[in-house]
Image (cartoon, rainbow, N blue to C red):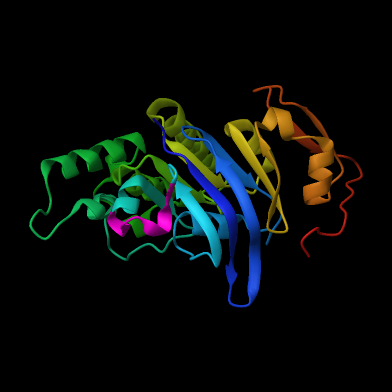
Amino acid sequence: MTAQLSTRALIAGYEDRVVLDGLDLDLPGGEFTAIVGPNACGKSTLLRTLARLLKPRSGTVLLDGAAVRDLPTREVARRLAVLPQSPLVPEGVTVAELVARGRQPYQRWWQQWSTSDAEAVREAMALADVDGIADRPVDTLSGGQRQRVWIAMTLAQDTDILLLDEPTTFLDPAHQVEILNLVHRLRSERGRTVVAVLHDLNQAARYADHLVAMRGGAVVAAGPPRTILTVDLVRDVFGLDCLVVPCPASGAPLVVPTWPVTVSPGKDA
């Protein structure tokens, strides 16, 4: 069985501002789901609520049918790992030390570090291809290397679900592809359920099995990219006139803005 996340009548926001209003959503287990949409449409709010970092005002987040709010914190941490936007790098901490922090949900006062913890850290660093830099301080690494280290830490947590909030932000194109290739491998080789907020629509269409398009705190469409990614959807969600053609390399939908580029006023302004 692969872990599955879903929401029912979910309402969430900040102070007096409601961002998600009555959201019903099913995220398929064992697949890579990409959440896309314009700025301030609720993508990160949704991810934070799924991860129990933001308490919903009402409604429910379900993990394999059980309300996440009712599960013990330690159990949630063993089943669901989250990588927030631009996490702060602890000064002087080495790669191995940071990855080892992913094992904290398994530590008890009577049972500290174990051989299984050490093996989980070694495997996570190897999978993320950072084992060769295990002794280097994280704050001396490039952006792409740092992001792989953070992903390795979530892998060491050994959960069925990974939630990644804009994992490619501020990275150059080569490092973006490197991170997305790694995420794709986690889904295809390890059967992990991956949910990631992505800004690049073409990257989302190429790598994801399942696409969730949001606008104004609501889900406009959800399903396989080749099914739902259309000219009308891009215009409706992003206000962008475009062509949608098959990618010559992968066959995935490729969004090509028309020329001259026409952009409608922001849907969520």
**Looking at the image, is 216 positioned above or below residue 222?**
below
Q: Position of residue 215 (x, y in %)?
A: 73, 54
| Image quarter (top left, top right, bottom left or bottom right) of the N terminus | top left
Q: Residue at x 74, y 35 (%)?
A: 229
Is residue 73 highlighted in magenta?
yes
Left or right of 35? Residue 69 is left
Tell which residue pokes out farthest to the left in this image: 110
Q: Position of residue 242 (x, y in %)?
A: 85, 39
Q: Report the span colored magenta.
A: 66-74
**Looking at the image, is 264 positioned above or below residue 88?**
above
Q: Quadrant of residue 256?
A: top right
* Residue 58 can be seen, yes or no: yes
Left or right of 17? Residue 69 is left
* Residue 253 can be seen, yes or no: no
Q: Position of residue 157 (x, y in %)?
A: 30, 47
Q: Residue at x 26, y 36 (%)?
A: 123
| Image quarter (top left, top right, bottom left or bottom right) of the C terminus | bottom right
